[in-house]
Amino acid sequence: MMNYVNLKHGGRYTRLYDIWCGIKKRCFNLKSINYKYYGGRGITICNEWLEFIPFRDWSLSHGYQEGLEIDRRDNNLGYSPENCRWTTHQENMRKTRQCKINMEKANEIRYLHKTGNYTQKELAEKFVLDVSTICYIINNKIWV
């Protein structure tokens, strides 16, 4: 007997499907760690994208490639074709609400880390950033 569960769109095990699920989770799942930054402050998904196929079709016709991330042009508006685009991780990180640094601060973080006088955790506390953001800066993954 064949399993017909995955025949609806065939994308269940793709990165694009995972991205779509992540959007829905952030906007609708009260238990999501990031809900407070999305659904909790009114960020929604347009009705068209409540189904995967329209989201997939829009993505493939608007520059989606492996490695890119979805970006909302206006972080105060929801996920919709008019407000979204595909971008690199570096670009996406530069416009997050939590991003309170510029190139000068990033260079200061790198300098202080190289002195050996600060751990990543201490730098995160000093600059009021996540440890993961400090790690990205130190490893030149953002603010290069």
Image: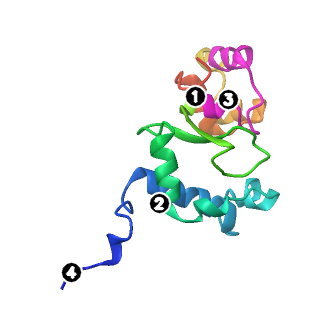
Observer-side mark, 4 or 2, equals 2
Three-letter amino acid code of the residue under disc 2 = Ile
Q: Secondary structure at mark 2?
A: helix
**Residue receiving disc 4:** 2
Q: Residue at x 75, y 53 (%)?
A: 37
Q: Quarter of the image containing the N terminus?
A: bottom left
| Label 3 vs 4, first from the N-terminus | 4
Q: Are marks 3 and 1 in contact (CB under 8 Å)?
A: yes
In magenta segment, residue 125: no
| Circle 2 residue | 53
State which region is magenta. 91-111
User: Badge 3: few (under 14), some or many (20 or more) residues near its Cα, within 10 Å?
Assistant: some
Three-letter code for the amino acid on which mark 4 is drawn:
Met
Tell me if mark 4 has few (under 14), some (14-19) or many (20+) residues whose alpha carbon lies within 10 angstroms of its own.
Answer: few
Disc sitting over residue 90 in the figure = 1
Q: CA distance from mark 4 to mark 2?
A: 23 Å
Q: Amino acid at mark 3?
A: Arg
Residues tagged 3 and 2 counted as in contact (Cβ below 8 A): no
CA distance separating discs 3 and 1: 6 Å
Q: In the rendered view, would you say 50 is above or below 130?
A: below
Q: Locate residue 38, reporting x and y percent.
A: 73, 55
